Every structure is written in structure tokens, then in C-alpha cells.
């Protein structure tokens, strides 16, 4: 998924850098879970995962990828779903997605607020989705809620279906990476009819726990083998940048404002986006949490300076520091793309002193 700071392409490197610990499995805390890509990787490698994020969108993905260990069977609804003859689904999940794709489009909250037809009364009608795709998203989201309300799908099936929608929507959104603004002309990808994508189901047969909270609240709850920290690097808060995914995930018809139709995010602000507070927060986590290894991903342009981070972490144990040249995320280029294509991704690995 397109997400600022997504570690999909770096997670293998991170995993390899941790091989020296000789930990084979154990309790892994994905403290800033985001897309869940890091948690997913360590889950596949046999770790038991605890994960959390301030974003509800991330919580949906965590429920589907991290907590869930089973292929959904959809036994409560499949008997009533007739498969179109020309489709050959390879799983029950694909059968249900095919059914959802074929629903009659409906005018709901997404159509009314984020498509040009629905917002024709505004000075700048919103062009996040075509009117047709907006109505498809509404029809799908309404159907998932109805199935869940009528007890026809389980909680895990409910989150798996919303996760499929969340993983699909970015391919049809008329934006350049984040939802703080929309293009004034249609991106060719946005005008294609939306088709749901199945998510990968991952099992490790362990009791993985997921949360939608400030992760600081969880630092003392468990004895972690590894705590993985991947905080925001700059002052841009995540919630306003992904507000539309939050609203599709919750489907709660929030009050919205401004050109982009933002929802309230006052309870989702991260102190890691505040230059004067980030380092203090990091030190609080390191000093208070129970762990064997703490791993921090950061980059050379972050609001915490490398030397300051090193000085804080080394007080608490044996520290190693690695760098990896990485192609800059496109939406962070700020027009500078020809000058600086690469940034240094950093990995701080701390082995806690046993007192
Ligand atoms: C750099 S992203 C993490 C990316 C993630 N590792 C991935 O691969 O997708 C930072 C994430 O931290 C979350 N966040 C920031 N402060 C938080 C906090 N105090 N507790 C929980 N989540 C937080 C943001 O919502 C965002 O999803």
C-alpha cells in the first residue's frame, strides 16, 4: 500500500540485521504498525506479534493480517451468493469479493462528499474518486456493515473484507500519495472501475494481539523480545494525510471540513511529529519498556538528529548503527526530485543492559 514510511522494501534488510540476536521467534512489538508490513514479515518468520497504531485504518489491517490466523470461510453468506459464470474464484474470499464487485452502486457518504457529482454545490467539487467508484465504495461498505450487523459474518471476516477495500482504494484514488489534496484532472488510474483485491491471509498459530491506541500505553504490559520503532520522521501528522481511508474504515459519517473534507484528528496526533518532544518521548520508551532488543528505524532527514538519538540510546545498553541508501518516497520530494533521489535509512539496534 502507498503509505509514507512503508517498510515493505526494507523489512528483509531489517530482519537480516537482527539475525545476530539468534532469537528464533519470541514476542515482537510493532509499535508504529502503519501498513503492518513489518509485523507481517516477523509473523511469517514465526514471531508472536503485538502491534498498535493511532490510525484506525492500520487497526483494520492489523486485525486482518496480524491477529487473524485463519482462511475466512464465509459460511453465513456463501449459500446465498450466486457466482457469475465467467469468474473462477480460487477461494471463498474471492467469491465474496466478486459478489461485492457486482453490487448495484449506491449513493452514500463517500459519493456525497468525495466525488464531483456528490459535491457539485462546492466552489471546488472534490475529485478524490469518480462518482461511479464513490458509489461502488459506498455499496460495498454498506453491504459489509449489514452482513456484520445481521451476524452473517464473523468479526474476523468483517475486518478482512474492509482490509481488502482499504488495500484496493488507493489504486483508484485521484491523489499523489496522500489524501490531503486531490488532482484537478483525472489520473488515468482513477477512472478505471474499482475491482476489489484479495488480501494475503497469514497464519503463525500464535495469539497475536492488535491495538488502536497510543503505543506508549503498551510498553509495560509485556516482556518483549524485540520492540520495533518506526516513528514519523517529520512534522506531518499521519491522520489528516490518510483521513479518507480512516472514514472508509470506520464508515461513521463524520463531520468534515475544508477543501479536502478532513475529519477531526485531534486525538490522533503523534508527539513524534513535534521536534521539541520527539527525543524525550523516545527516551521515555527506552527507559520504561521491557525488552531484550529495541530497534529504531529512522532516516537522515528526521526531526531528531542522529547524534542526539545515539546519545540517548547508548545510555541504555549496547548499541549498533546501520545505514542503507534508499530511494526517496515520491510524495516527499517537494519538487527536489532531480537533486536528491536517495536518502539514508537508518537502523539503531539496542541490546538492553541487564541490571
Ligand atoms: C513511519 S509510519 C510506520 C510505517 C510502518 N512501519 C509500515 O511499514 O507501514 C508511522 C506510524 O506511526 C503511527 N503513530 C505515530 N505515533 C504513534 C503512537 N504514539 N502510537 C501509535 N502509533 C503511532 C502513525 O499513525 C503511522 O501509522
Image (cartoon, rainbow, N blue to C red):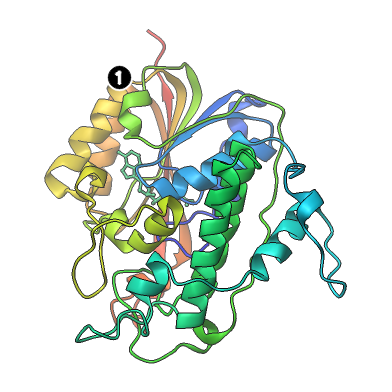
Q: Can residue 291 be seen in this view?
A: yes
Q: How many marks?
A: 1
The residue tagged with tag 1: helix, strand or loop? helix
Q: Is residue 130 visible?
A: no
Give whichever of 12, 110 is nearer the camera.
Answer: 110
Give whichever of 141, 262 is nearer the camera.
Answer: 141
Q: Is residue 246 left or right of residue 41?
A: left
Q: Is residue 60 left or right of residue 334?
A: right
Give whichever of 234, 253 is nearer the camera.
Answer: 253
Residue 225: x, y in percent?
52, 22
Identify the residue at image location x=41%, y=50%. Answer: 250
Could you tell me which quadrant the C terminus lies in?
Answer: top left
Figure quadrant of residue 309: top left
Q: How crowded is mark 1: few (under 14 residues within 10 Å), some or many (20 or more)?
A: few
Residue 296: x, y in percent?
40, 40
Residue 313: x, y in percent?
31, 31
Q: Name the residue under label 1.
A: 288
Identify the residue at image location x=36%, y=52%. Answer: 252
Placement of 216 over or under 81, stated as above or below: above
Figure quadrant of residue 3: bottom left
Give whichever of 306, 155 is nearer the camera.
Answer: 155
Figure quadrant of residue 196: bottom right
Q: Ligand 1: does it lie within 8 Å of the C-beta at label 1?
A: no
Placement of 235 over or under 18, stated as above or below: below
Name of the residue lying farthest toward the bottom: 185
Placement of 218 over or under 214, stated as above or below: above
Name of the residue lying farthest toward the top: 355
Name of the residue lying farthest toward the left: 276
Identify the residue at image location x=24%, y=51%. Answer: 265
Identify the residue at image location x=45%, y=53%. Answer: 249
Amino acid at each position: 500500500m502507498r503509505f509514507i514510511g512503508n517498510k515493505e522494501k526494507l523489512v528483509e534488510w531489517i530482519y537480516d540485521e537482527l539475525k545476530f540476536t539468534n532469537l528464533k521467534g519470541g514476542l515482537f512489538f510493532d509499535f508504529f504498525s502503519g501498513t503492518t508490513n513489518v509485523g507481517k514479515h516477523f509473523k511469517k518468520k514465526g514471531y508472536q506479534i503485538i502491534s498498535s497504531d493511532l490510525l484506525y485504518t492500520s487497526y483494520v489491517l492489523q486485525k486482518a493480517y496480524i491477529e487473524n490466523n485463519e482462511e475466512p470461510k464465509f459460511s453465513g453468506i456463501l449459500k446465498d451468493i450466486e457466482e457469475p459464470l465467467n469468474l473462477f474464484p480460487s477461494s471463498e474470499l474471492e467469491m465474496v469479493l466478486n459478489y461485492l464487485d457486482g453490487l448495484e452502486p449506491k449513493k452514500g457518504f463517500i459519493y456525497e462528499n468525495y466525488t464531483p457529482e456528490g459535491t457539485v454545490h462546492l466552489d471546488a467539487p472534490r475529485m478524490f474518486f469518480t462518482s461511479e467508484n464513490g458509489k461502488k465504495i459506498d455499496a460495498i461498505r454498506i453491504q459489509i456493515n449489514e452482513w456484520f450487523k445481521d451476524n452473517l459474518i464473523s468479526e474476523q471476516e468483517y475486518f478482512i473484507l474492509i482490509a481488502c477495500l482499504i488495500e484496493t482504494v488507493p489504486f483508484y484514488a485521484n491523489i499523489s500519495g496522500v489524501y490531503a489534496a486531490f488532482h484537478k484532472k483525472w489520473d488515468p488510474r482513477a477512472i478505471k472501475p474499482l475491482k476489489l483485491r484479495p488480501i494475503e491471509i497469514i497464519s503463525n498459530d500464535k495469539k497475536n494481539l492488535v491495538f488502536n491506541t497510543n503505543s506508549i500505553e503498551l510498553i509495560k504490559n509485556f516482556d518483549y523480545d524485540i520492540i520495533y520503532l518506526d516513528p514519523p520522521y517529520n512534522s506531518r501528522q499521519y491522520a489528516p494525510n490518510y483521513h479518507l481511508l480512516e472514514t472508509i474504515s470506520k464508515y461513521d459519517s463524520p463531520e468534515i471540513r475544508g477543501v479536502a473534507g478532513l475529519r477531526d484528528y485531534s486525538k490522533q496526533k503523534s508527539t513524534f511529529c513535534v521536534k521539541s518532544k520527539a527525543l524525550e518521548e523516545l527516551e521515555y520508551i527506552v527507559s520504561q519498556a521491557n525488552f531484550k532488543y529495541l530497534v529504531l528505524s529512522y532516516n537522515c532527514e528526521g526531526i531528531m538528529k542522529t547524534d542526539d538519538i545515539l546519545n540517548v540510546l547508548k545510555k541504555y545498553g549496547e548499541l549498533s548503527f546501520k545505514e542503507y541508501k534508499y530511494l526517496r518516497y515520491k510524495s516527499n520530494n517537494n519538487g527536489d526530485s532531480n537533486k536528491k533521489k536517495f536518502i539514508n535509512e537508518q537502523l539503531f539496534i539496542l541490546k538492553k543492559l541487564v541490571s
